[in-house]
Image (tube, rainbow, N blue to C red):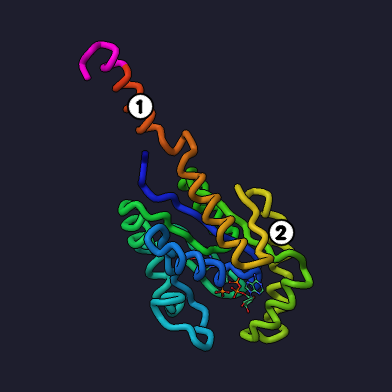
Amino acid sequence: MDRRGILIVVSGFSGSGKGTLMKELLSRYAEKYALSISATTRQPREGESDGREYFFKSKEDFEKMIAKEELIEYARYVENYYGTPRGYVEEQLDSGRDVILEIEIQGALKVKERFPDTLLMFVTPPNVQELKSRLVGRGTETMEVIESRMRRAAEEAQGMDQYDYLIVNDDLDTCVEEMHTIIQGEHHRSTRNAEFMREIKEDLKRSLKGEI
Ligand code: ADP
Ligand code: 5GP
């Protein structure tokens, strides 16, 4: 079967638990998945380090990356730029790993347009009260930023149905396994295995002719 990696976009409201979910998925299945590290102009949060959560860039440097076409996509989100560097994604897909982009909806739709095989997954918490309490509980943003992220969530909810799968992050452990199962199932989609099917057809013809 075709073992080129699948490009996967994971989006979800800020505070839905995407980051936590991705960390857990990668720690359980490190050999199968690679997480793309984005570039951003936002300031690092406490505990974040350059090259691990993000490549932290100045606005000037980010704009240079855009000009040199080093990004697969980029978007502005709540006053900052965020974008996906191209090199790592291509390298990992070629090596057979599924590559996950944890990006917001504008970027997600741009990636899907450019690479129609992309698998789009949208993560939500079980309900809105839980979303707010996770954002507050994380303790990394001011109330003002939390309010702007809730407003942004209301906008993003309008695009949820353009995604291929909805992932409800209620119990973390269940959610990680659901996500893994969906992705592994996706490898069996017939359209992702055109080359394998072509070879089987050819070999059957050759077998009938007594060639193999
Ligand atoms: P995002 O990356 O979507 O902004 P985070 O991964 O930072 O969200 O999660 C937001 C907060 O919710 C964090 O404090 C995290 O520990 C918590 N959280 C994540 N997943 C769950 C879950 N399934 N149940 C309860 N809390 C969770
Ligand atoms: P945060 O500031 O909470 O880390 O991220 C804010 C939002 O930007 C999240 O929805 C996150 O998924 C999104 N994001 C992170 N990296 C990228 C990227 O490379 N491109 C786009 N379009 N969005 C990104």
Of the image marks 2 and 1, the number of the one nearer the N terminus: 2
Is residue 164 shown above or below 43? Answer: above
Q: Is residue 7 left or right of residue 144?
A: left
Q: Residue at x 56, y 67 (%)?
A: 21
Quarter of the image where one finds residue 60: bottom left
Report the residue at 62% width, 50% height from top. 165
Quadrant for the N terminus in the image: top left
Q: Nearer the viewer, residue 24 or 124?
A: 24
User: On the image, numbered disc 2 is attached to which residue?
Assistant: 157
Gap in angstroms between the C-alphas marked 2 and 1: 40 Å
Tell me the crowding category of disc 2: few under 14, some 14 to 19, or many 20 or more residues within 10 angstroms, Cα based.
Answer: some
Which mark's residue is nearer the viewer, 2 or 1? 1
Q: Give the magenta-colored segment's residue range.
A: 205-212
Q: Is residue 211 magenta?
A: yes
At label 1, the amino acid type is Arg
Ligand 1, image quadrant it occupies = bottom right
Quarter of the image with the C terminus is top left
Q: Could you tell me which residue is drawn at 52 percent across and 55 percent down?
A: 180
- What residue is shown with label 1? 198
Q: Is residue 69 visible?
A: no
Question: In the displayed structure, does residue 136 sit left or right of residue 23?
Answer: right
Does dot 2 land on a helix, a strand or a loop? helix
Total count of labels: 2
Q: Residues within 10 Å of mark 1 (few under 14, many from 20)?
A: few
Q: Is residue 145 visible?
A: yes
Task: Report the amino acid beneath label 2.
Answer: Ala
Tell me where residue 31 appears, x and y as whole percent: 37, 61
Which sits in the foreground, 116 or 94? 94
